[in-house]
Amino acid sequence: MSRSRLLSLSALVLALGLTAFAPSDYVVAAFSNMRPGGTVNGWEAMSLGDAPRSQYALVRDGSSTVIRAEANRSASGLIRRFDLDPNRFPIMTWRWKAENVISGGNIRSRGGDDYPARIYITFDYDPSDLSFGDRVKYRALRALGYDDIPVRALSYVWANRSSETQIVPNAYTDWVQMVPVRSGSSGLGTWQTERRDIVRDYRAAFGEDPPAISGVAIMTDADNTGGSATAYFGDIRLGTR
């Protein structure tokens, strides 16, 4: 075999090897593989203080199994905890559908901090790195029953007002930054597919590189406004650029 052919074959083998071992998507939620009416395996309830809990169930929608989330003056979520380097999997993709926006919802006020659909991505930020005042606040929130309060999180939301397009701090704490992905009534009642670069969003929100991902949560809430909302969540993945 000639030297040129040998080099070409070696290059081909190397390319195939790199392709074979390229990282695949990290599947955060495979609701489509679950049984309607069954248990949401790998996920656990996420409560918010003493607020009544929203309802979550696996249902059939068209040809796929998805999560139906219903809030009636309630607030809670489902969370899946895991540890993952966001630089390996910086792109989050998902499907969701909202049936309604919430009258009185306002991303900039505590009384309006309700959304028909949101997806949190939480990060493993060490609370000991907080300022003294924030450490006091963190301990106080834990004492009040907010066990799942994140120190750093991005909250991707279907905002209630069509004018919301910018990343803004949560009305309760700047530890959570709100990222409007959809806003207003456009697209209600139909499935929407989303794609976000979580590393770029984190840098834009917090001004630094993100630590490890610690979990992803889905949530439909209407406790602050006293309203109601119904939404559906499909599969969620983290992948490469």
Image (cartoon, helix red, strand yellow):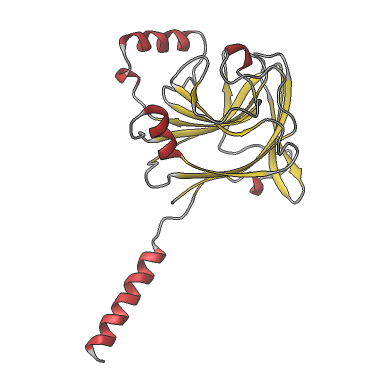
Q: Residue furthest bottom?
A: 1
In the depicted view, which residue is nearer to us: 208 or 18?
208
Does 224 sit left or right of 123 as displayed? right
> How many labels were placed on the picture?
0
Residue drawn at 62 percent across, 22 percent down: 76
The answer to whether one can see residue 67 in this image is: yes
Write down the quadrant of residue 65 in the picture: top right
Write down the quadrant of residue 35 in the picture: top right
Residue drawn at 42 percent across, 25 percent down: 152
Q: Quadrant of the N terminus?
A: bottom left
Residue drawn at 48 percent across, 25 percent down: 177
The answer to whether one can see residue 28 in this image is: no
In the depicted view, which residue is nearer to us: 8 or 54?
8
Where residue 86 appears, as percent x and y from the top left, is 40, 41
Where residue 227 appears, as percent x and y from the top left, is 73, 17
Q: Residue furthest left?
A: 3
Residue drawn at 74 percent across, 40 percent down: 59
Write down the quadrant of residue 186 in the picture: top right
Q: Is residue 4 above or below residue 126?
A: below
Does 227 sit left or right of 159 as displayed? right
In the depicted view, which residue is nearer to us: 125 or 178?
178
Where residue 145 appears, as percent x and y from the top left, is 52, 12
Where residue 171 appears, as percent x and y from the top left, is 53, 16
